Amino acid sequence: MTTEGEAARIYRRYNVAENTRDRVAMGALLDPALTVEMNGSAAIGSADEDDAAMDALFRAYPDYRREIVAVVDGGPEAAVRWRMRGTPRPELADRLPVIDIRGCSFVRVRDGRMAAAWLYADADAMGGLLSLAATLAPPDA
């Protein structure tokens, strides 16, 4: 019998917390010094930056969800194919696209938390999405 490694377990737990908008649980699964690259470029440099980005995404896309399609388990590292979907709030529909993006993340876990992630997805689909969502859906929206 094969058991799932630590990185796959942590990623799955993070994904459940993300889909239920449990930002406390999400933060507990991230190393404070988390680093994230998107398509080979630095994108996020801390757990706080990840929280801010996810907050903007949740506010702009109330039905946002990420589905795990497949996981390749490597103990402290895992590769995860995923699909993100979401529809912008009605008042943002003319400025934000509907999300239906497929991609892959490679993650590394240290001391029970995600410490690093490398995301690969369609650059045109992902490009600027989080910053645009943050701009269009301020915290008081």
Image: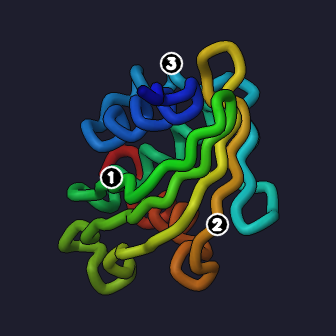
| In-image side of 23 versus 45 (left or right) | left
| Residue 15 drawn above or below residue 118 | above
Q: CA distance from mark 1 to mark 2?
A: 23 Å
Indicate which disc residue 59 carries. 1
| In-image side of 5 versus 24 (left or right) | right
Disc 3, SS = helix
- Which residue occupies the extreme top position in the image? 111
For disc 2, the marked residue is: 120
In this view, the residue in front, 15 or 53, is 15
The percent coordinates of residue 85 (x first, y second) are 32, 66
For disc 3, the marked residue is: 28
- Of the 4 image quadrants, the one containing the N terminus is top left
Q: Mark 1 is on which residue type? A: Arg
Nearer the observer, disc 1 or disc 2? Answer: 2
Asked whether the viewer can see residue 44, the reply is no
| Residue 14 drawn above or below residue 31 | below
Q: CA distance from mark 1 to mark 3?
A: 21 Å
The percent coordinates of residue 123 (x first, y second) are 63, 79
Structural crowding at the residue carrying mark 3, measured as other residues with C-alpha within 10 Å and reported as few (<14), some (14–19) or many (≥20)? some
The percent coordinates of residue 15 (x first, y second) are 39, 40
| Residue 90 drawn above or below residue 61 | below
The residue sitting at 55% across, 27% down in the picture is 5
Q: Mark 2 is on which residue type? A: Tyr
The residue sitting at 42% across, 44% down in the picture is 55
Marks 1/2 in contact by CB < 8 Å: the verdict is no
Nearer the observer, disc 2 or disc 3? Answer: 2
Disc 2, SS = strand
In this view, the residue in front, 11 or 87, is 11
Mark 1 or mark 3: whose residue is earlier in sequence: 3
Structural crowding at the residue carrying mark 2, measured as other residues with C-alpha within 10 Å and reported as few (<14), some (14–19) or many (≥20)? some
Classify residue 17 by image quadrant.
Answer: top left
Q: Mark 3 is on which residue type? A: Ala
